[in-house]
Amino acid sequence: MISKSQIKLISSLKLKKERYESGLFTVEGEKPVSELVKSGWPVELILVRSDWFEKERPVWLKDIQTNMELVSHHDMERMSQLNSASPVMAVARMKQPDWQWQRGGDGFVLVLDRLADPGNLGTIIRIADWFGFQGVLCSSDTVDFYNSKTIQASMGSVFRMPVAYGELTEWISKEDPQRVFATVLGGSPVNGQKFGTGGLLLIGSEAHGLHPDLIRLAGHKVTIPGFGAAESLNAAVAAGIMASWVKLGTG
C-alpha cells in the first residue's frame, strides 16, 4: 500500500524545483508509461488505479520488473499533474542526456528557442521523432523537458528522441550558416527552399519568435506562406509544417 509520505513526495513533483532536488519525475497515461517501460529508462515505481486494473488487466503490465502499487482513484487524483488523472502513473529517475550534437553531420536537428508551453514542446518532440530528426536542441529557458504535460503530449517520443538544453548561440555559431534555417515572418517561402541533407531548423517561441541573435546566425530565413488573416502559427504547427518540407518536400 502506498504511504502518505510517498503520496506527498509524488504530489510535490508538480514543481520543477522538487523534481530537480529529488531527481524524480512523473509520467502519466497508459501509452507514455508503456513507452517508458519499453525504453529501458530507469523507473522507480508504477502506480495503477485499482478499479481500472481489475477491469482492464492490461497485458503489458503483467511482466514488468518495476515495483507496482495499486492505488485508489482519490490518491491518484492527489498525485496527478493533469486536470483529469490517468489510471496509470510512473515515477521515473532523471538521467543525463547521452547525446552530443555534432556539427556538419547528415540529418537535421530541431532547435527550439524560449518555448513556454509544455504541450507544444512535447508535440514538437513527437514531430521530430515522426520525421526522423537527429535530436532536439533547446534554449536553457525553454520549458522543462520533465514537465508531465510535455511527456504526455510527446506520447512516449521523449524516451526515444535525444533532447539537450544549452546556449543556442554557442551551438549555432559552430555550424556552417548555409546549414542553418530560421523560421521567421517575411523570409523566403518554404516551398521554394532547398534544404539539402542536414543542418539545423530553428523554431521560435509562441510569443516572441526567434531571438534576433539566432536569426543573424542563420544563412536562410524561411517562411510558411499564409493566405488568411491569422497573424502567426502555433509553434508546434509551424514545426510540423517545416519538418515535413525539410524531410519530404525538397532534397
Image: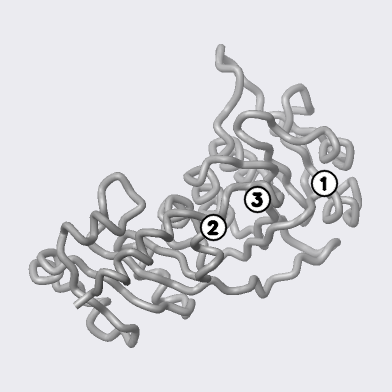
Could you tell whether 251 is left or right of 118 in the image? right
In percent of the image, x 26 and y 79: which residue is there?
68
Q: Where does the image place residue 138, in percent across and percent down from the top left?
A: 68, 52
111 relative to 235, above or below: below
- Quarter in which the N terminus is drawn: bottom left
Q: Which of marks 2 and 1 is in front?
A: 2
Task: Kindly identify which residue carries mark 1.
Answer: 180
Q: What residue type is labelled 1?
A: Val
In percent of the image, x 50 and y 51: which residue is there?
122
User: Badge 3: few (under 14), some or many (20 or more) residues near its Cα, within 10 Å?
Assistant: some
Secondary element under disc 2, as helix, strand or loop, is helix
Task: Kindly identify which residue carries mark 3.
Answer: 247
Q: Which mark is residue 17?
A: 2
Q: Which amino acid does label 3 sit on?
A: Lys
Outermost residue, top side: 229
Residue at mark 2 to residue at mark 1: CA–CA distance = 34 Å
Residue at mark 1 to residue at mark 3: CA–CA distance = 15 Å
Q: What residue type is labelled 2?
A: Lys
Outermost residue, front side: 5
Secondary element under disc 3, as helix, strand or loop, is helix
102 relative to 127, above or below: below
Q: Where does the image place residue 48, in percent across and percent down from the top left?
A: 22, 69
In the image, 17 versus 238, the foreground residue is 17
Assess whether mark 3 and mark 2 are in contact (beta carbons under 8 angstroms).
no
In percent of the image, x 49 and y 61: which residue is there?
18
Q: Nearer the viewer, mark 2 or mark 3?
A: 2
Q: Where does the image place residue 78, in percent across and percent down from the top left?
A: 26, 56
In the image, 19 versus 93, the foreground residue is 19
Could you tell whether 80 is left or right of 104 in the image? left
Q: Where does the image place residue 159, in percent across and percent down from the top left?
A: 51, 67
